Amino acid sequence: MKYSFTGRNIALTDSLREAAQQKIGRLERRLPKDAEVSVIFSVVRHENTVEVTIPLKKRILRAEVTENDMYSALDSVIDVLDKQMVKYKTRLREKKRRHPITHDEEAFAPEVEAQTQDAPIAIHKKKRFAVKPMDEIEAVMEMEMLHHSFFVFRNDKTDEINVVYRRNDGEYGLIEPE
């Protein structure tokens, strides 16, 4: 596996890097051998945040945890990633049983026993709305008026569906299709 470490408002020490590699090593048996792991350590107002992103073939594993101690945040983020992997692997198995031809089990390495049995995902509410053409600024204003954390709109410049959202740091983000 290839590791990429980034520190924001923190000086990365060798012991922190080694601890991260050791903890992520627990997940190594479930990941492809050529997986790239991006680890971002940040400190904001005495809160330590660890963010781990692992892009796979058709899936991205990502977890972000904020704690008082950097090492406990690292432990927690690995636990979250482990649960995500087990949950996804369980879904792949269920999908394989229902539709044996259309499964995608290449995203993770060899067999993993399901450690937890999650309830099936159920959509409780569906909503339909007209997607209006507008620019990003109008979309942000509309999102703020509705008191939502995201807003779907048609970009009037590109004529594609975009999403604006409020980030955890209070700034705004834009999602555009490739």
Image: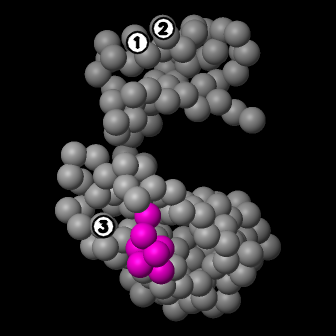
Q: Secondary structure at mark 1?
A: helix
Question: Which of 125/57 is in front?
Answer: 57
Q: Amino acid at mark 1?
A: Glu
Quadrant of the image containing the N terminus: bottom right
Three-letter residue code for mark 3? Met
Q: Is 52 on the left or on the right of 118, as rendered?
A: right
Which numbered circle lies on residue 142? 1
Magenta residues (range):
12-18
- Main secondary structure of the magenta stretch: helix
Choose mark 1 or mark 3, whichever is in front: 3
Q: Is residue 68 above or below residue 31?
A: above
Residue identified by numbered label 3: 70
Q: Secondary structure at mark 3?
A: helix
Residue in front for this viewpoint, 119 or 10:
10
- The Cα atoms of the two marked residues, 2 and 1, are separated by 6 Å
Q: Residue at x 48, y 8 (%)?
A: 138
As measured in the structure, the alpha-carbon distance from the residue carrying label 1 to the one carrying label 3 is: 38 Å
